[in-house]
Image (cartoon, grey):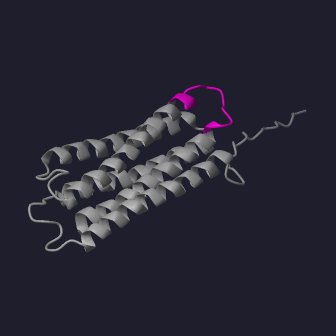
Amino acid sequence: MAQAVVTQTPKVREPIRFNKPSMLGVGTMVWLGSELMFFSGLFAAYFTVRANRTGAWPPPGIKLDIAQSAVFTVILVMSSVTMQKAVFEAEHGRKRSARWWIVLTMVMGLSFLSNQAVEWTHVTFSTSTNAYGSMFFVMTGLHGLHVLLGIVAMGFLMLRLAGSKSDPGELAALQSVSYYWHFVDVVWVALYAVLFLIH
């Protein structure tokens, strides 16, 4: 008498999702609200200086490589996509894949910073040249510092995701860093538009 063969279908791992933001995520959003006010103050200062400026704006002698900066703006914006992909992979328990997406995001962020460093050494003006020069270096410099802090935070994420055991707090940390990175990218889009396109 033939025996019936019972086959078991493999269990599909359900993605880990929060029904509500974690406390770390809420704290990050509150902190980003203060960062938004900080950058809003910089934009307000820029437009105040511009409104009270007599003559051409930007002043004569200001030359920026708009096309090259546009390329690295696209790279930075695309890094938000790779960062979100890392979150998606972590939600589905694929830590190794998440780490690779974080590394790619870090490389894109570092390439953006490298371009900014090259740009700073090639511009024909400085902080003491005129008001535009002062605002340009202050605004891009502070944004670059935020990009660097984001890359450092990703480095700590890599250490946290390195272990084979599941850490219940690692996904919340990853999501919080992704909130910060998306914020940094959005701020740069606004800075690029103001400083490079509609100045």
Q: Nearer the viewer, residue 77 or 187?
A: 187
- Residue at point 27%, 67% (across, down): 49
Q: In this view, does 2 lie to the left or right of 56?
A: right
Quarter of the rendering occupied by the N terminus: top right
- Residue at point 56%, 42% (across, down): 174
77 in magenta: no
Residue at the right extreme, as displayed: 1
Q: Position of residue 19 (x, y in %)?
A: 72, 54
Q: In this view, does 4 lie to the left or right of 88?
A: right
165 in magenta: yes
Write the start and end of the magenta stretch as one range: 159-170
The secondary structure making up most of the magenta span is loop
Q: Where is residue 79 in the image (x, y as percent from the top left)?
A: 40, 49
Q: Quadrant of residue 11?
A: top right
Residue 198 visible within the image: no
Residue 54 higher or lower than 38, as above or below: below
Q: In this view, does 65 lie to the left or right of 191?
A: left
Q: In this view, does 139 lie to the left or right of 84?
A: left
- Residue at point 59%, 25% (across, down): 163
